[in-house]
Amino acid sequence: MVDYVKRPSTPPAAPAGASAAPVSLSKVTLTKAAPTVSLAKGSGGQMRVHLAWNAKPAGAGGGGFLKKLTGGDRGIDLDLGALFELRDGTKGVVQALGGAFGALDRPPYVLLDGDDRTGGGGENLTVNLDKLSEIRRVLLFAFIYDGVPSWDKADGVVTLVPQGGAPLEIRLDEHGGSRMCALALLENTGGTLNVRREVRYIDGAQDKLDQAYGWGMDWTPGRK
């Protein structure tokens, strides 16, 4: 399975941010009908992003169609990552591929804690909101690196937990034959962080995700 890593390029201008409704104090499920929330201006601390999925759907070890979908006993390997753009125009990607795990106390202020190839514990990514003034936007994504090419089989759930705020849940239970899925877009709008559910399936890998959202970077093929 060919994946992609980023090569630097000149950044284009960022799009205008969208308006959003204030977040409540209880868990919020972002849906097609209600896709956007905003954190209170001045919210800081760390936002943890957790991706969980079912690595071994029922029947995955058996024969027939489902076994072909899941690639035998290998199970489902999802990768969590993020495209980022900082206020100074710096752009890049945080992902396990190429060891681009990022950092919290220095640019890009986004950190991936590891690569879970089993789905047992899921994957975690953290955004340092104390540095929100340095961040323009972050696009969270998940990629089916190996296994079933259908998101309803993977049964993924992504949960964003801002420090001291309500958890934001996005369920990936729709059918999608593409391996790439844009999860959520985080945008800094005048010091307020807007969080918008995307759940947009992209045909291709990171380069096609970039094109779909106008990130404007150059990519080269790579593997884990």
Image (tube, rainbow, N blue to C red):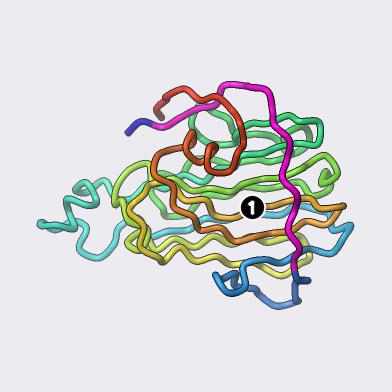
Q: Residue at x 78, y 56 (%)?
A: 193
* SS category of the residue bearing label 1: strand
The magenta stretch spans residue 10: yes
Query: Tag 1: Cα neighbours inside 10 Å, few (<14), some, or many (≥20)?
Result: many
Where, quadrant-wise, is the N terminus in this rendering? Answer: top left
Point out residue 64 in the picture as x, y percentages from the top left corner.
Answer: 10, 57
Identify the amino acid type marked 1: Leu
Point out residue 120 in the picture as x, y percentages from the top left corner.
Answer: 42, 55
Please tell me in which quadrant of the rendered image residue 24 appears. Answer: bottom right
Q: Residue at x 37, y 41 (%)?
A: 145
Q: Residue at x 76, y 43 (%)?
A: 136
Please tell me in which quadrant of the rendered image residue 84 appears. Answer: top right
**Label 1 sits on residue:** 185
Q: Is residue 89 above or below residue 19?
A: above
Point out residue 65 in the picture as x, y percentages from the top left corner.
Answer: 14, 57
Q: Is residue 219 above or below residue 39?
A: above
Q: Residue at x 43, y 38 (%)?
A: 205
Residues drawn in magenta: 3-20
Please tell me in which quadrant of the rendered image residue 10 appears. Answer: top right
The magenta stretch spans residue 46: no
Could you tell me what secondary structure mostly forms the magenta stretch? Answer: loop
Q: Residue furthest left?
A: 64
Q: Is residue 32 above or below residue 148?
A: below
Where, quadrant-wise, is the C terminus in this rendering? Answer: top left
Point out residue 209 in the picture as x, y percentages from the top left corner.
Answer: 51, 41
Between 77 and 3, the residue placed more toward the observer is: 3
Total numbered labels: 1
Q: Is residue 19 above or below residue 215?
A: below
